[in-house]
Amino acid sequence: MTEPEVLVPPTLGVVESIGDLAEGRAWLDSLPGLIAELREGWALRLGAPWTGGSCSWVAPAELPDGRPAVLKISWPHPEMMGEAAALRLWHGHGAVTLYAHDGVRHALLLEQADPGTTLGDSDGLPAEERLLIAARLLDRLWSAPVADPGGFDLLSHVTARWAGLIEQRMARLRPGFDPGLVALGARLLRELPTTAARRVLVHGDVNPGNILAARREPWLVIDPKPMVGDPGYDPWKLVEQIDDPFRHPDPTAVLRRRFALFGEVTGEDPARLAAWAAARRVEDSLWWVSRGNPPSHRAMAEAAILASIAGL
């Protein structure tokens, strides 16, 4: 493996993502030194960094015994803090294996998924088959016993904060959204976590790009942003992104089938999954406007469809 001459090229996603923030620039300035320390400490040979990733520097690596690996160094932010603990808990069962963790440098040494094709790029597989793959993986991850829930963020705390932000943004930005639908979204974010039949370690960001084809197992998840709470939180991004359900001739029928599929595999109530999807769509819509973008009334119409499927 050839050592790259430029460790932090300006084309990296993380450079573009956090380079405008003062704390981001300071971390980027320290990054070459962090890479050198970790390369020496773990005796790694590094390849050129991958360009994707908005909050971390990620590159292929080779361990001293010749095994392929991945070095990931994260910009410190709350969502990444539980990643190592979650991967330890899952212990390679449905997720990439954690080889080593440096908590001071916020670095992970990970199993490399080969060939690494994302579930989203597996166009040869029908959408429903890809969703089945994802649902089975999630069911395995959720079965891991969480001995110390205090080691992770509580989903109920996170979504209650989001509910407050929805209400503040609606009042401040006045985007013209249906106030009843916005109020429903905020209420669901507060209530759904408190009425869950079980609490599990949710992945937090499981989407088609975070499930990779591998050899040790056919598919492995990466990049968790873990929280402890209602498993119903996890499936929406998969349902939404495996392909756009709202571009089908009958999106309601497609969505009902997809939620039912997750219910068949995981035992979760499809209506509850749809309720989580409606709440998250409302939250996404207000977040989008808060970033200076024009209001998306299409997204809110989609939230209404999801609420209808949930029977709300």
Image (tube, helix red, strand yellow):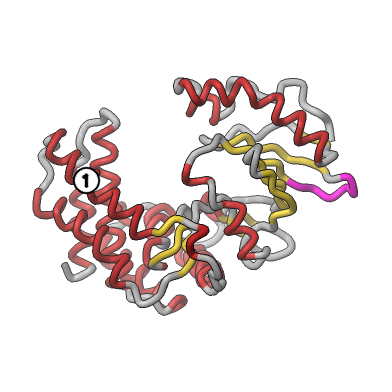
Q: In which quarter of the image is the C terminus?
A: bottom left
Disc 1 target residue: 166
Residue 66 colored magenta?
yes
In the rendered image, residue 302, in percent from the top left (x then y), is placed at 23, 53
Location of residue 191 by image quarter:
bottom left
Is the residue 130 above or below the residue 17 in the image? below
The answer to whether residue 83 is visible is yes
| 261 up-or-down from 13: above or below | below
Residue at 88%, 47% (x, y): give it.
66
* Horizontal and vertical percent position of residue 99: 74, 53
Mark 1, secondary structure of its residue: helix
Q: Residue at x 79, y 35 (%)?
A: 39
In this view, the residue farthest toward the right is: 65
Query: In this image, 67 relative to 33: left or right?
Result: right
Q: Is residue 60 left or right of residue 190?
A: right
Quadrant for the N terminus in the image = top right
Magenta segment, prevailing SS (helix, strand or loop): loop
Question: Is residue 94 one of those drawn in magenta?
Answer: no
Query: Which residues lie in the magenta part?
Result: 64-69
Dot 1 alpha-carbon crowd within 10 angstroms: few under 14, some 14 to 19, many 20 or more: many
Q: Where residue 77 appears, x then y in whole percent?
A: 49, 39
Residue located at (45% from left, 66% from top): 128
